[in-house]
Image: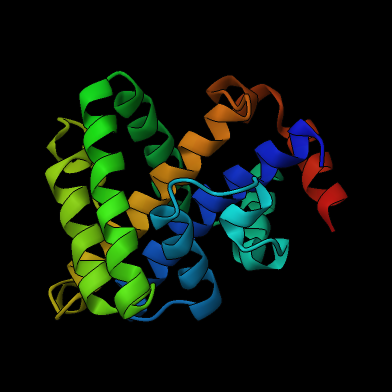
Amino acid sequence: MNREARQALALAGVFQAAAVVDELARTGHADERAWQTLVRATIDTQPETFESIYGGNHNNLRLGIETLDTVLSRGQMAPNVMRYGFSMVLLMQKLRKQPQMMSTLSERLDRVNDQARHFGDTHENVIASLGQIYQDTLSTFRYRVVVNGDPSLLQSRMMPERVRTGLLSGVRFALLWHQQGGRRWKLVLGRSGLRRALASID
């Protein structure tokens, strides 16, 4: 897999997180395969290969691939999904300027990985821990991601933790995208190249 394809897949992870957060906020549910892929990618801080981050099968990122393709082709897209995706890229950039916070995130995610081995990746104890990590780190920035949806759903049991976990996973994929050479200007000037890279993945 070439570098452009890795960039496209990592960015698809960002927009998969954006789509899942939007779905959770509006309906209280999310695509299970997409959700599990996001959680696993977030707690696996030392993947053996790039492909293992998303479980070795690009169909695990199918929701993100389709969402990103719609964004890049300027198709009909829920405004909130696009906003969440770009907001998570912005949060990633702020996080990169905070090495101490990066270190804290890494240490705490390692502990959650141990927790996940005991309970299972998407157990509510794991999700609660991931949500708390987001609250203690990324949500302390002056720039916040405001999630819109059904107020009663957003206040329901475990929903705040699930939404924060989705946002954390999006930032994780945004970091991966940056590590693979992804840059914000490419989202504006490199749309056609990203679309070609996405098409080459199938």
Residue at (56, 35) in percent of width and height: 177
Q: Which colour scheme is used?
A: rainbow
Q: Is residue 125 above or below residue 55?
A: below
Locate residue 167, reporting x and y percent. 34, 52
- Name which residue lies at 64% across and 45% down: 50
Residue at position x 76%, y 40% in the image: 5
Q: x, y percentage for residue 59?
A: 70, 67
Q: In which quarter of the image is the N terminus?
A: top right
Tell me if residue 123 comes above or below residue 65 in the rendering: below
71 to the left or right of 99: right
Q: x, y (%) of residue 154?
A: 19, 71
Q: Visible in this render: residue 148?
A: no
Q: Is residue 134 left or right of residue 54?
A: left
Expressed as whole percent of the image width and height from the top left, the position of residue 175 reads 47, 35
Residue 42 in view, yes or no? yes
Q: In this view, does 60 lie above or below 103?
A: below
Total numbered circles: 0
Image vertical order of residue 168 relative to residue 26, above or below: above
Looking at the image, which is closer to me, 48 or 130? 48
* Position of the C terminus by quadrant: bottom right
Question: Closest to the observer: 55 or 149?
Answer: 55
Please identify the quarter of the rendering in which residue 186 is found.
Answer: top right
Q: Is 197 situated left or right of 91 in this image? A: right
Q: Which residue corresponds to the image point at 13% horizontal and 37% vertical from the top-left?
A: 140
Residue 73 occupies quadrant: top right
